[in-house]
Amino acid sequence: MKKIIHIVPTFELGGVQTGILYSLKDLRKKYDYKVLVINIIDIDWIKTQPDEIKNQIIWSGSNNIIKGWLNAYRILKREKPSLIISSLWKSIIISVTYKIFNNKTKLIGFYHTSRYVHQLNNLFLKIIGKFQDAAFTDSEAVKKFIEEKYSIRNAEVIPFNFVFKEKKNEMKIFKTDFIKLAYFGRLNEQKGVFRAIQFCKMLKSENISFCFDLYGEGETKKIDLFIKKHQLENVVFIHQLLPIDEVMNTMNNYDFLLQLSNHEGMALSVVEAMSAGLVPIVTPVGEISSYSRDGYNAIWLNPDFDQNLGELLLKVKKVIDNPNLYYEMSNRTPELFKKYKTYTESLIESIDKILL
């Protein structure tokens, strides 16, 4: 078996890490596929995973990023992989350094967002572009971004599309007298959490009965203060991060996903929610605009996002007032994923091309 190591900076909550966990069981049947984690953060997130998954994850042994880099490099020297996949910018310094001294090892840069966060992030993305043997992206939107920004062409799209075991309940009842909204992911401004809470304030002003549950980690104290400031403590609630095997079952308890992000790639949480039959209330950023359609299987907040919340409210009220419309949209939510191969199928196919 070829040895492949997928490097990530941490195993904190995110679509990258979730995608790895969803696919690791199948990937290890094909390759000696391991995940190298540079920083020991959020180990609790994977405690519920079976040993066959946990045993494929190598921890650097440090919660200090510098020491974590050094330890990770030593681990690569010990493991001697045939191929390295580098996800997220903090993994690049290790993957590129190892590539420089071990040129026969194939290096793949895996890109997950259609923007860079800051200039250091931008610099590292430029660096890996000079040394990688191939590039993967999680969506066409990200592929277009790296082509325009970094002149990286012919990237392989590895869509974050999975076959989920838990199917939505076809008999799910949509109760218009109490609407259930949820969010799953990082709790921060980039994910539009504060914007979503502003929208909840508008729902409350329209006397719509609802609850909005946020599952995740991040700026919880800041968000909690924002909730209290707008007197939404009785309708907006922050919950702990869910184990990965509980996410789909929990999603089945809700009517809508409310995720008003500034930027996205594939947006795995939206894919999961739509697969569970939730109607997503989303911004059409990244790949979301390709697999969802406003008024068909999703409700879009169009730009300028903060200025168009009133328009979004009218769209949502239209669906709330018409249960048949809700059911039609809910039943269509998984439809557009049929045009995508699964993440695991695409990844194996693309890796085989490079190894051969």
Image: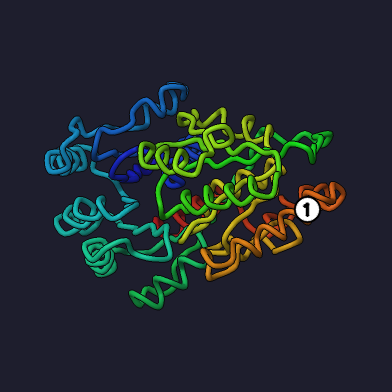
Question: At label 1, which amino acid type do we have?
Answer: Val
Quadrant containing the N terminus is top left
119 left or right of 196? left
Q: Nearer the viewer, residue 122 or 71?
A: 122
Q: Position of residue 234 (x, y in %)?
A: 57, 32
Q: Nearer the viewer, residue 291 or 178?
A: 178
Q: Position of residue 208 (x, y in %)?
A: 71, 44
Identify which residue is drawn at 42% across, 60% down: 113
- Mark 1 neighbour density, 10 Å: few (under 14) some (14–19) many (20 or more): some
Identify which residue is drawn at 82% across, 47% down: 327
Regarding mark 1 in the picture, which secondary structure is present there? helix
Q: Would you place residue 102 above or below residue 168 in this image?
A: below
Q: Position of residue 203 (x, y in %)?
A: 65, 48
Identify which residue is drawn at 55% across, 42% down: 183
Q: Nearer the viewer, residue 353 or 127?
A: 127
Mark 1 sits on what residue? 319
46 left or right of 343? left
Residue 186 in view (yes/no): no
42 left or right of 124? right
Residue 59 in view (yes/no): yes
In which image quadrant can residue 282 be found? bottom right
Q: Would you place residue 230 above or below residue 303 in this image?
A: above
Q: Residue furthest right?
A: 324
